[in-house]
Amino acid sequence: MDIILSFAIILLSGVLAAKLLHKVKFPAVTAYLLLGILLGPEALNLISGKIIDISGLISNIVLSIIAFGLGQNFSRENFRRIGKSVLWISILEASSAWIAVTLALFLLLKKPFHLSLLFGAIASATAPAATVMVIREFKAKGTFTSTLLGIVAIDDAWCLIIFAISLAVAKSLATASRENLFLLKMFLYPIINIGVAFLLGASLAWVISFFSHYIRTRENLLIYTLGFIFLNASIAMHLHLSILLTNMFMGMFLANINKESFRFFNILKTVDPPLYLCFFILAGANLELTLLGKIGVMGITYFLFRLIGKLTGASLGAYISKATAAVRKYIGFGLVPQAGVALGVALIAKVEFPSFGGIIFTTVTATTIAYEAIGPFCTKFALSKAGEIRE
């Protein structure tokens, strides 16, 4: 009864919190995180401990669905549509945030390199929801808006690739004292991990596409799609691969080999709202408030250098791709928000590295609340400066 009651509280209070905070222009993600902290074991304790214990399972389910959807962005048609500016800007702003945060924590704060590397990888993510919300609210249109939408659509996919590489390297570095060939392992393991994930995702995408003509109804299509996503995730976990990459590759291949692939992606929109709500609220409930006092300088450094990396990388990408002056100056301000994928990979880091994963997750959760609070204002500033807000 406690578990069922907890889910009832999560769903109903989540809807209410999102409605209330929307009145003061708070993004729904921020509302869910704050509510999760309030309902969690370190505050009101209204969520069953059994649900907290399986939050990792819920996270894997939701992240598998998110990663599958992100694969759609790698279709040939999408790349032709978004153009070279979006590609250059998205790659450089993600990698610049990765490098900036990693070096800042390693060189300035003297943190272990594997810890710094994981923070840097998480910093590469951008949350599209807050940015899209502002664009819709102010009915922004134009070249700047189109470029920004293209970047936020593909950005989290780069984050998954960066995180998979960083996680593999971090694992090798963390066990360096017990491995004679750790340098060889450090370079080979990420390549093998990504390569096998690529093959697994491609194989299952072919199977999905081949048998899809037997699926006639929307209900069966939903069951069929979710079944393969979970199958892919389970095989990946058994082989110690990234569930994020395997599902993203499956979505990517499906988008390129099946002319009606949009059906698989669109059908998931009928079930993902309650899953996302539970994911974010449980992310807030997993926040260890006792660790907040320890993030201090590290949290501030992560917050500032992620911004520096995003702004610098975005401007550099816009300059290289010869984008418009408005894009070169202001595109980075639209990439401030950070939420879903960042929280998901931070939760993975917490599970993979019990000794220091808690401080990673707590830091990312705390800064996510700050980013989601200021992000919409930064996006509005950028759109206004670009002259694409219709007053």
Image (cartoon, rainbow, N blue to C red):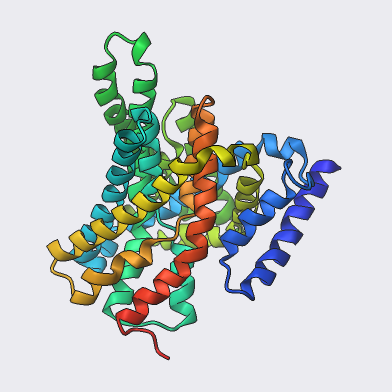
Q: Position of residue 136 (x, y in %)?
A: 47, 78
Vertical comparison of 48 with 316: above or below = above
Would residue 301 appear left or right of 318 to someone viewing this image?
Answer: right
Q: Position of residue 238 (x, y in %)?
A: 49, 26
Q: Quadrant of the N terminus?
A: top right
* Quadrant of residue 256 within the rendered picture: bottom left
Q: Quadrant of the C terminus?
A: bottom left
* Quadrant of residue 147 within the rendered picture: bottom left
The tally of labels here is 0
145 or 294: nearer the eye? Answer: 294
User: Which residue: 22% across, 63% down?
Assistant: 315
Q: Is residue 347 visible?
A: no
Vertical comparison of 174 with 280: above or below = above
Q: Is residue 7 visible?
A: yes
User: Which residue: 36% across, 35% down?
Assistant: 109
Q: Position of residue 240 (x, y in %)?
A: 44, 26
User: Which residue: 42% across, 35% down?
Assistant: 242
Vertical comparison of 159 with 11: above or below = above
Q: Residue furthest right?
A: 1
Q: Position of residue 222 (x, y in %)?
A: 57, 55
User: Which residue: 50% across, 51% down?
Assistant: 367
290 or 190: nearer the eye? Answer: 290
Q: Residue furthest bottom?
A: 391
